[in-house]
Image (spheres, helix red, strand yellow):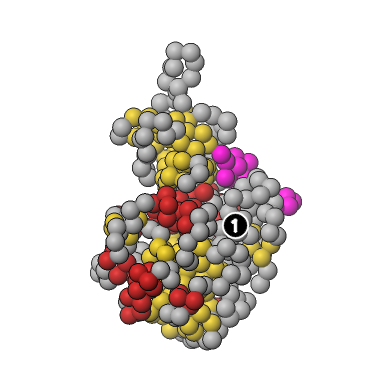
């Protein structure tokens, strides 16, 4: 059965709204000026509180007394001790450790709310239904009831704006808002990025569930000036700058968590058994991931912007510009125009690629020069006895 499309977004009725395409179809890509929207979302320029329509995304609820212990047993993160009101991120892996689903988890004390990218909902719910056995859990697709609204907090404990809080869904006495754990290395995780200050340390991203019938109230708050809006392009540019992976963009059929530095937020190395754990442990302790995520600074002088899927090659070398190696060394996964840095991208490349090598991205309109900054280092893995590097905010405990 095909995935049921989310209802048309009420935000598309706002002036200047341009609909996104592809996997994110159905929500505004921008409202006429993506760079201004990005500055507003990042807090660089003053504005009313900014929200991002993510109403095309999926919501699955898991209720019942066994919900957390069960989710803990089948996914990569330690969820058994998740306290009411807490957030987490977990991955559903194949038996070979490949990433199948990336799940944002919020528990309200009675129900675990699973937030997923568009297109994931049906297959995730079906898999969970097959795996429930005799456990005391109830699983339901709640996407038709609840829409997701994104926003970027200015500090870890900053509350939602009054206009958003007024319509936010609640459960167990808690507003249903997921807080992204990406700014810190969670307990049991490890960071592969060899940096003292991670660019995601200030990525205080939030996703709030709103009953769909109340979305027009948010639109009215935008029209009255109580709220401002930014399109998906603005949010994606800031996500890329924070080195934050996303299933719909960075993951393919071969991806394992180590390649994307997803070990910092979505994997617990010391919890009990789960599907794919053997691969996670072997690559981390004894081997190296075959590929690795890098951040690309792109040459924008020719106004050519690569697209996701474009291949990455070694740049020509020598005074005569001899061609580099004929085979691709990787591919672009996400592309954005950052309000300060210009065109940037995330790409997955071969582990052995020299971190100092010059690169080009091959597009339909010609090659674009690129400079890579390693997110996952070539030496990542084989980590027995190594103390993980932590960003300046310290480790999250729960």
For the record, the magenta segment spans: 373-388
Extreme-top residue of the structure:
320
Query: In front here: 313 or 166?
Result: 166
Label 1 Cα neighbours within 10 Å, binned few <14 / some 14-19 / many ≥20: some
Residue at 69 percent of width and 47 percent of height: 196
Image location of residue 96, percent across then percent down: 49, 56
Give the residue drawn at x 50%, y 59%.
Answer: 46
- Residue indicated by mark 1: 202
Q: Is mark 1 on a helix, strand or loop?
A: loop
Secondary structure character of the magenta stretch overall: loop
Viewer-nearest residue: 65 or 230: 230
In this rendering, would 366 be left or right of 380?
A: left
Task: Report the quarter where the C terminus lies.
Answer: bottom right
Q: Is residue 375 magenta?
A: yes
Is residue 352 toward the left or the right of residue 19 in the image? right
Q: Position of residue 357 (x, y in %)?
A: 54, 29
Magenta stretch: includes residue 300: no
Residue 58 seen in the current view: no
Q: Quadrant of residue 120?
A: bottom left
Residue 253 vs residue 239, the one in the foreground: 239
Coordinates of residue 375 in the picture (x, y in percent): 57, 45
């Amino acid at each position: 059965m095909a995935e049921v499309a989310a209802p048309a977004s009420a935000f598309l009725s706002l002036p200047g709204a341009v609909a996104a395409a592809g996997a994110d179809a159905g929500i505004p890509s921008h409202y006429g000026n993506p760079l201004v929207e990005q500055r507003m979302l990042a807090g660089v320029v003053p504005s009313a509180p900014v929200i991002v329509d993510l109403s095309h995304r999926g919501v699955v609820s898991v209720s019942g007394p066994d919900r957390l212990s069960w989710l803990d047993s089948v996914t990569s993160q330690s969820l058994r001790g998740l306290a009411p009101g807490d957030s987490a991120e977990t991955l559903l892996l194949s038996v070979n450790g490949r990433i199948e689903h990336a799940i944002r988890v919020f528990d309200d004390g009675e129900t675990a709310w699973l937030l997923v990218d568009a297109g994931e909902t049906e297959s995730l719910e079906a898999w969970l239904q097959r795996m429930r056995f005799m456990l005391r859990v109830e699983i339901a697709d709640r996407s038709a009831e609840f829409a997701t609204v994104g926003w970027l907090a200015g500090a870890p404990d900053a509350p939602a704006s009054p206009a958003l809080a007024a319509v936010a869904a609640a459960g167990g006495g808690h507003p249903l808002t997921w807080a992204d754990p990406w700014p810190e290395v969670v307990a049991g995780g490890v960071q592969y990025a060899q940096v003292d200050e991670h660019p995601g340390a200030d990525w205080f991203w939030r996703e709030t569930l709103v009953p769909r019938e109340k979305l027009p109230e948010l639109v009215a708050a935008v029209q009255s000036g109580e709220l401002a809006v930014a399109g998906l392009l603005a949010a994606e540019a800031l996500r890329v700058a924070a080195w934050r992976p996303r299933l719909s963009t960075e993951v393919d059929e071969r991806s394992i968590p180590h390649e994307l530095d997803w070990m910092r937020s979505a994997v617990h190395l010391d919890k009990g058994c789960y599907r794919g754990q053997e691969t996670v442990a072997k690559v981390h302790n004894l081997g190296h991931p075959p590929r690795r995520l890098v951040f690309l600074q792109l040459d924008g002088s020719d106004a050519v912007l690569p697209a996701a899927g474009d291949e990455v090659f070694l740049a020509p070398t020598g005074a005569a510009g001899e061609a580099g190696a004929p085979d691709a060394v990787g591919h672009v996964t996400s592309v954005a125009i950052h309000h300060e840095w210009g065109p940037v991208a995330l790409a997955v490349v071969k582990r052995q690629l020299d971190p100092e090598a010059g690169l080009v991205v091959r597009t339909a309109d010609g090659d674009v020069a690129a400079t890579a900054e390693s997110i996952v280092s070539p030496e990542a893995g084989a980590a027995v006895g190594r103390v993980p590097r932590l960003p300046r905010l310290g480790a999250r405990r729960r």
